[in-house]
Image (cartoon, rainbow, N blue to C red):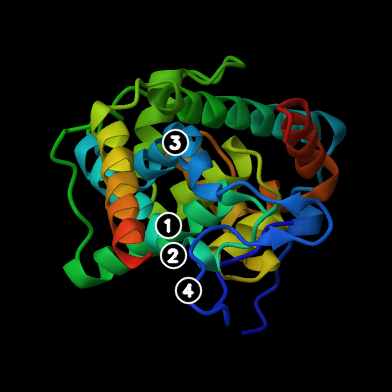
Amino acid sequence: MSSVMPSDEKDKPDRAKLADRSELAREIDENLKRVYRESLEEPVPDRFAALLDALKAKEAGRKGGQS
Amino acid sequence: MIHAPLPDNRTEASSSAPADAATGQHPDPREEIASHIPALRAFAISLTRNGSAADDLVQDTIVKAWSNIEKFTPGTDLRAWMFTILRNLFYSARRKAVREVADPDGLHAASLSVRPAHDGRLAFADFRAAFDQLSAEHREVLILVGASGYSCEEAAEMMGVAVGTVKSRTNRARARLCELMGLSGTDDDFARPDALSLAVSSALRSAGA
């Protein structure tokens, strides 16, 4: 319950450590962006153009029927 | 600022985009859907880690967005709105399936044996492998905040959680990533606003977020 957390004593961040962390964070971010970008740059399968066409056609049909 | 889907009192008679008093007629936001498909797929892949499951998820998202477009607030971020639909579909399907779908395409799940030398560069293959081992919740928050450049506030709206939860989850996810890559990194390390948030937010700004 009252366990002492010596975090401030034990690993007081010095400049080098902070620089290390921010460098690591920057690298993580760069890699995350690359993971995302690689998926983003994949060609979009044709099924999605077909899907949007089908949705539009369905809607046009419904509107035509209503009015 | 994005707006999560809200129940809308508009009658269902007008399914086309309503006029905006200030700027005149908005075009039908559905015209914009096609341009968001690459981002939707990237987000879906990061959640499912599986190409065909991701495409099914994107398809369901498009159909749902299309038929509920009257709940979208014109002039707000359609991509964020669709991301919200996508992640809600993903998590509700996962709840139904009880267990998380395993990785049938075998995307890297086992390739963590090589311990990377921390010589200043994270090897991308190791990073990718570690990323794929994270929980979906951790992948989600890292992709939304770290990669696609949404603010913690925007991510919180999409995820339906408090901003503080987004921040702490991001820190835990980063720490877990480091752990999986054999690098030291506690979530305390990633909670230091002086070092980390500055680096991250400036990276996001430079990415045009």
Q: Which residue is mark 1?
A: B65
Chain of the residue that carries numbered disc 1 in the rendered image: B
Query: What residue is at 48 percent from the left and 64 percent from the top?
Result: B15
3 and 1 marks in contact (CB < 8 Å) = no
**1 vs 4, front mark:** 4
The quadrant in which the N terminus of chain A is found is bottom right
Q: Earlier in the sequence, mark 4 or mark 3?
A: 4
Determine the secondary structure under disc 2: loop
2 and 4 marks in contact (CB < 8 Å) = no
Chain of the residue that carries numbered disc 4 in the rendered image: B
Chain of the residue that carries numbered disc 3 in the rendered image: B
Q: CA distance from mark 3 to mark 1?
A: 12 Å
State the residue in front, B177 or A33.
A33
Determine the secondary structure under disc 1: helix
Determine the secondary structure under disc 3: helix
How far across and down, in percent of the image, does residue A47 sit?
23, 33
Q: CA distance from mark 2 to mark 4?
A: 12 Å
How far across and down, in percent of the image, does residue B16 sit?
52, 59
The quadrant in which the C terminus of chain A is found is bottom left
Q: Which residue is mark 2?
A: B68
2 and 1 marks in contact (CB < 8 Å) = yes
Q: Quadrant of residue A40 in the image? A: top left
Q: Quadrant of residue A15 in the image? A: top right
Marks 1 and 4 share the same chain: yes
Q: Which residue is mark 3?
A: B34
Taking the image as drawn, is residue B174 in sight?
A: no
Q: Which residue is mark 4?
A: B13
Taking the image as drawn, is residue B205 in sight?
A: yes
Marks 3 and 1 share the same chain: yes
Q: Amino acid at mark 3?
A: Ala
Q: Earlier in the sequence, mark 1 or mark 4?
A: 4
